[in-house]
Image (cartoon, rainbow, N blue to C red):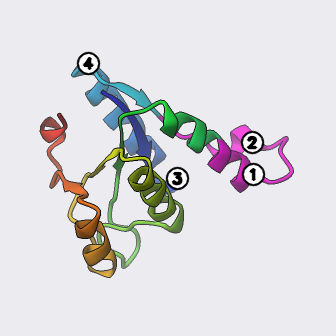
Amino acid sequence: MKIILVSSMQFYSKLQKIKVTLENKGHKIILPLTDESYKSEKNIKRKAMEDFNKNLRDSDAILIANFDKESNPNYIGVNALMESGMAFILNKKIFILNSIPENCKDEFQAIRVIELNGNLKKIK
């Protein structure tokens, strides 16, 4: 399965570990580029979203890697929320690594986000 990883860039090192784990299971994984990769762009966020859209069309799923961030358990940022909406529109599978946070539980359940509860083996 071809999967795009999405998360707060604060967790980039964790994304790299997840990438290796999933690739060892035979998946093709796309990591987001860091903002540093876009330093020559006038609008970094827009270019990153355009790249995400291109990759999303050619993928099977996204995996939202949500971790505790400061006082927010299982944090999901605005970009990850937007990206999950785009994946829903394109009928892609949407996985979430840890439990769905309360502030978006109804919406994620409505679009059938698959909770992995930390178990990457559940990705099929």
Q: Nearer the viewer, mark 3 or mark 4?
A: 4
> Quarter-wise, where is residue 105 in the image?
bottom left
Name the amino acid, label 4.
Gly
Badge 3 element = helix
Residue located at (36% from left, 44% from top): 92
Residue beneath disc 3: 9
Asked whether the beta carbons under mark 4 and mark 1 sit within 8 Å of each other, the answer is no
Expressed as whole percent of the image width and height from the top left, the position of residue 32 reads 54, 40
Stretch in magenta: 31-50
Q: Quadrant where the N terminus lies?
A: top left
In this rendering, position of residue 104 left or right of residue 118: right
Frontmost residue, 36 versus 120: 120
Expressed as whole percent of the image width and height from the top left, the position of residue 121 reads 13, 36
- Residue 26 numbered mark, or none: 4
- Kindly report the distance in space between the C-alpha atoms of the residues bearing marks 1 and 3: 14 Å
Measured along the vertical axis of the image, is residue 4 above or below residue 111? above
Asked whether the beta carbons under mark 4 and mark 2 sit within 8 Å of each other, the answer is no
Residue located at (75% from left, 51% from top): 44
Q: Residues within 10 Å of mark 1 (few under 14, many from 20)?
A: some
